[in-house]
């Protein structure tokens, strides 16, 4: 009966566990994995708004991620401006760019749209590769300064990075959750299910898709800034590539599309897997880590097409004998 | 000079066309984006490379073997993976093919290292055709001619054989095809196989002048997506013209704006064309 | 009553698909509080006309006015926001959402909060007898319930006028009775209706006026009694169908 409360509690429970984990295990690799996990879970949540809710498949979110990373880095590298301001600026810039690219892309439907987002991201990548002002293909090493909150650089511990990632992740997840439970979420899902029905219900489909894209882009960009500050180096191949876009797509679909738990579950499985296999097997340069990664993805796709979440739901509903398990998807 | 650029653009364009024809077939018949398409191309290149290295077989002689290898690989991909995800919701099929791409690419890296390999001597290596100021590499010319032949072979097959017509029917509508008593299961597997053979041929032809490494298929996949969408999903003629158009815009864009921008131009062309034809050049 | 400005006015609308003329110079109007039926044989152009009126198609020629405002070529969502909404002949349920969520989506148009939207949705679900199925995914409903959901969703947008495209097709006798009552109920609430329907015995008793289309052209526009006795209409359409339909329904189809 209290399905709703149960679900809210689950989310808070998950959030608290995530927050506590790195304090219970001080292993540096573990803390590193936690930071990357939060970044990608957050990216998945942000992507989910435009693709999972609104049904507009984006293969180009690396563009917004990269813009976030480059904006703060350039502002700091060239003008010494704090990455926090850079993060805001990056989010604003990503929003502006999302509006500019959305207009031509939203005229396209389905796969045509997906390929268009991929094209936009590739164009932006090419521009950055050959743009001297941002050091082109060479990339930028962020100047190391004394660790502090204002400089968003921490050299003695990963905990501050973890906390920043956690806050960004929390903001993103809560935003997604708020959208899902209010008018905008209903409107986006209606657009996903049927453009025509949505229009007949008085929904300005173009406008709402645009809103979704703007929110998604802004949130994605903030993670870009954090990522750059965490790695302290960026080049176009790290942030603007199809691999980044696809990683976001993969983990969200793997977890379960169109649901705020999906990206968390997907990232919780894929990120430790890829990070740990990289640590233990990747050093050989033989690509075993990614082979396992690929095989796992195929396996999940073949045997649990609704994502891991689909599997959990099936289990739960089997216990409850509930025929309509997909209803709350 | 300009003529030279245009010609080489068109030549490479035909190879793109063949790769795109393979992709668009699957797309049209099953509505599936095969992210591993370019990796089949890479497998073909390695096949040719090893036959050349171990058995001294000329790439052109091993072309049928490479095509057979990728036909089987692609056919099995359908039987083992795609079959299970073809009716799955949303992006699941895409997830599966992306996983496959990762797997194949890294398996190749595991087996053969990420190093670049070259086929340094073959029937066509370093040969040139000179016509006044225009110089055309024979490998490129052979690749283009071979691609055209394979493209027309596929078109002929689809138009004139029983299986081909069944593929056409399945592309129109899955349900109609079933009603007509077509074994869609078999048709899908064959379509996948043919799609694989297309990149198999393209890969063998490219191996004579293109470095061979685990990621050599990546660029072709990416371009093929754009070409397929540009031509209209599932449209073979669209893929053919789209490939040439992309080859041309890449060459001309590279010439006038600098090679670093040539792919940016390609993607820009896609966005521009789709503004006027939101379902591709030949889409409806 | 008919002195006032019409609710909906269709003026000389023509719609073409290539060389096919689906609507040719169609004009008619619907007044506030009326139930008007739009009938005609298959392929007469009824759905096409609906699409033109509600902004899904831009008519080739002609103009459409809603409450005196020109809405020709305006996007569908604006037209719905003005108070004119429609259902689809080929139902378009928001499949992955529950019945209630479907209706709630429509209710957000006039509600200022989720709570208010919930209230509207509950009312509409009650009115369309869908309350019992509100937690089912819309995709799993029977065709009859999907048709109901179409109506429920349209009503949730708080319309002044609703256009129903074959909302009764596929319903059984009891369900048709219910649908007829619902139409009259809506009329009493002051909602104007334009109904496309093939089931004559369902619409003739409740319609104030009947507009007949044949091969894209309007061939009659009169009271139900006049239309059923109009020779041209009988020839074009009613003759076989009215009899065929009533015979079929006697056998309980
Ligand atoms: N999108 C379209 N493109 C081309 N032709 C169309 C299109 N929509 C409808 N038509 C054609 O226009 C004509 C009118 O169709 P319409 O659907 O409006 O008829 P209808 O009166 O609603 O028929 P029914 O009673 O079967 O629903 C038909 O000949 C149909 O084939
Ligand atoms: Mg109709």
Image (cartoon, rainbow, N blue to C red):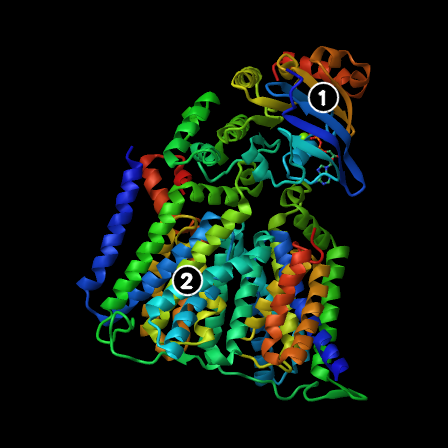
Left or right: where A13 falls relative to B94 = left
- Whether disc 1's CB lies below 8 Å from ligand 1 is answered no
Q: In which quarter of the image is the C terminus of chain C?
A: top right
Marks 1 and 2 in Cβ contact (< 8 Å): no
**Dot 1: element:** strand
Given residues B230 and C142, the one toward you in this image is: B230
Mark 1 and mark 2: span between their CA atoms? 56 Å
Q: Which residue is drawn at 46% across and 25% down?
A: C124
* Relative vertical location of residue B159 with respect to residue B61 in this rendering, above or below: above
Residue B206 can be seen, yes or no: yes
Q: Residue A285: x, y in percent?
A: 40, 78
Q: Which of the numbered marks, if any, corresponds to residue C171?
A: none
Given residues A140 and B214, the one toward you in this image is: A140
Given residues A94 and B241, the one toward you in this image is: A94
Q: Residue A201: x, y in percent?
A: 53, 36
Q: Chain letter of disc 1?
A: C
Q: Residue C108: x, y in percent?
A: 45, 36
Q: Residue at x 58, y 40 (%)?
A: A196
Q: Chain letter of disc 2?
A: A
* Relative vertical location of residue C8 with respect to residue B221 in this rendering, above or below: above
Q: Quadrant of the N terminus of chain C?
A: top right
The residue pinned by badge 1 equals C211
Residue A253 can be seen, yes or no: no
Q: Which residue is drawn at 50% across and 41% down?
A: A190
Image quadrant in which you'd find residue A9: top left
Left or right: where C72 falls relative to C12 = left
* Relative vertical location of residue B60 with respect to residue A255 in this rendering, above or below: below
The residue pinned by badge 2 equals A91
Q: Residue A309: x, y in percent?
A: 37, 49
**Dot 2: element:** helix
* Relative vertical location of residue C252 with respect to residue A13 in this rendering, above or below: above
Badge 1 density bin: few <14, some 14–19, many ≥20, Cα 10 Å: many
């Amino acid at each position: 009966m209290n399905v709703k409360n149960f679900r809210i509690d689950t989310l808070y429970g998950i959030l608290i566990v995530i927050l506590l984990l790195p304090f219970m295990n001080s292993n540096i690799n573990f803390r590193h994995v936690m930071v990357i996990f939060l970044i990608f879970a957050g990216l998945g949540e942000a992507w989910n708004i435009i693709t999972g809710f609104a049904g507009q498949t984006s293969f180009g979110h690396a563009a917004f991620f990269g813009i976030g990373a480059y904006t703060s880095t350039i502002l700091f590298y060239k003008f010494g401006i704090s990455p926090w301001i850079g993060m805001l600026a990056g989010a604003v810039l990503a929003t502006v760019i999302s509006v500019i690219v959305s207009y031509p892309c939203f005229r396209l439907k389905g796969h045509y749209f997906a390929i268009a987002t991929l094209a936009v991201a590739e164009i932006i990548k090419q521009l950055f590769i050959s743009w001297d002002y941002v050091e082109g293909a060479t990339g930028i090493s962020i100047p190391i300064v004394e660790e502090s909150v204002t400089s968003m650089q921490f050299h003695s511990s990963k905990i501050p990075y973890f906390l920043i990632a956690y806050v960004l992740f929390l903001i993103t997840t809560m935003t997604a959750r708020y959208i899902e439970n209010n008018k905008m979420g209903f409107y986006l899902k209606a657009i996903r299910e049927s453009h025509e029905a949505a229009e007949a219900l008085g929904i300005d489909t173009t406008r709402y898709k645009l809103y979704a894209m703007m929110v998604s882009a802004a949130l994605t960009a903030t993670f870009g800034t954090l990522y750059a500050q965490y790695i302290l180096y960026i080049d176009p191949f790290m942030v603007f590539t199809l691999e980044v876009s696809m990683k976001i797509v993969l983990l969200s679909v793997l977890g379960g599309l169109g649901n705020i738990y999906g990206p968390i579950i997907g990232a919780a499985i894929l990120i430790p897997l890829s990070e740990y296999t990289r640590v233990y097997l990747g050093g050989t340069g033989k690509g075993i880590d990614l082979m396992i990664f690929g095989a796992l993805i195929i396996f999940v796709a073949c045997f649990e097409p609704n994502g891991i979440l689909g599997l959990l739901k099936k289990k739960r509903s089997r216990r409850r004998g509930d025929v309509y398990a997909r209803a709350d998807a | 000079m300009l003529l030279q650029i245009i010609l080489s653009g068109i030549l490479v364009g035909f190879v793109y066309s063949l790769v795109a024809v393979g992709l668009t077939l699957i797309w049209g018949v099953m509505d599936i984006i095969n992210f591993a398409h370019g990796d089949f191309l890479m497998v073909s290149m390695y096949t040719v490379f090893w036959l050349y290295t171990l058995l001294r077989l000329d790439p052109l002689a091993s072309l049928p073997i490479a095509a057979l290898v990728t036909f089987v690989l692609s056919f099995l991909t359908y039987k083992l993976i795609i079959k299970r995800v073809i009716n799955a919701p949303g992006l699941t099929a895409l997830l599966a093919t992306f996983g496959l791409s990762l797997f194949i690419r890294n398996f190749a890296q595991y087996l053969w290292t990420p190093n670049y390999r070259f086929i340094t001597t073959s029937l066509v290596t370093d040969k040139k055709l000179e016509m006044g100021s225009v110089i055309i590499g024979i490998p490129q010319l052979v690749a283009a001619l071979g691609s055209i032949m394979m493209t027309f072979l596929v078109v002929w097959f689809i138009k004139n054989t029983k299986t081909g017509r069944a593929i056409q029917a399945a592309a129109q509508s899955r349900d109609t095809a079933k009603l007509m008593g077509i074994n869609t299961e078999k048709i899908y597997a064959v379509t996948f196989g043919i799609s694989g053979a297309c990149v198999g041929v393209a890969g063998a032809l490219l191996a004579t002048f293109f470095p061979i490494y685990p990621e050599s298929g990546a660029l072709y996949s990416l371009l093929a997506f754009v070409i397929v969408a540009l031509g209209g999903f599932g449209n073979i003629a669209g893929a053919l013209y789209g490939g040439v158009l992309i080859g041309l815009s890449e060459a001309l864009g590279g010439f006038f704006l600098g090679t670093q921008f040539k792919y940016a131009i390609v993607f820009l062309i896609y966005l521009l064309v789709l503004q006027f034809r939101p379902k591709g050049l030949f889409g409806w | 009553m008919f002195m006032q400005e019409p609710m909906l006015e269709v003026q000389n609308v023509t719609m073409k698909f290539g060389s096919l003329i689906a609507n040719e110079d169609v004009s008619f109007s619907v007044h506030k509080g009326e139930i008007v039926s739009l009938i005609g044989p298959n392929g007469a152009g009824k759905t096409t006309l609906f699409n033109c009126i509600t902004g899904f198609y831009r008519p080739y020629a002609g103009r459409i006015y809603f409450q005196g405002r020109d809405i020709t070529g305006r996007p569908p969502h604006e037209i719905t926001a003005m108070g004119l909404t429609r259902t689809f002949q080929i139902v378009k349920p928001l499949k992955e959402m529950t019945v209630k969520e479907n209706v709630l989506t429509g209710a957000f148009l006039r509600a200022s909060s989720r709570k208010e939207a919930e209230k509207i949705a509950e009312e509409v679900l009650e009115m369309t007898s869908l309350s019992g199925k509100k937690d089912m995914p819309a995709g799993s409903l029977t065709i009859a319930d999907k048709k109901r959901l179409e109506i429920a969703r349209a009503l949730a947008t708080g319309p002044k006028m609703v256009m129903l495209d074959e909302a009764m097709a596929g319903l059984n006798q009891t369900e048709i009775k219910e649908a007829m009552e619902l139409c009259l109920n809506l009329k009493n609430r002051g909602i104007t209706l334009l109904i496309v329907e093939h089931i004559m015995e369902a619409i003739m008793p409740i319609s104030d006026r009947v507009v007949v289309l044949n091969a894209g052209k309007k061939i009659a526009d009169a009271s139900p009694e006049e239309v059923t006795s109009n020779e041209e209409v009988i020839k074009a359409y009613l003759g076989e169908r009215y009899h065929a339909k009533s015979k079929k329904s006697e056998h309980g189809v």
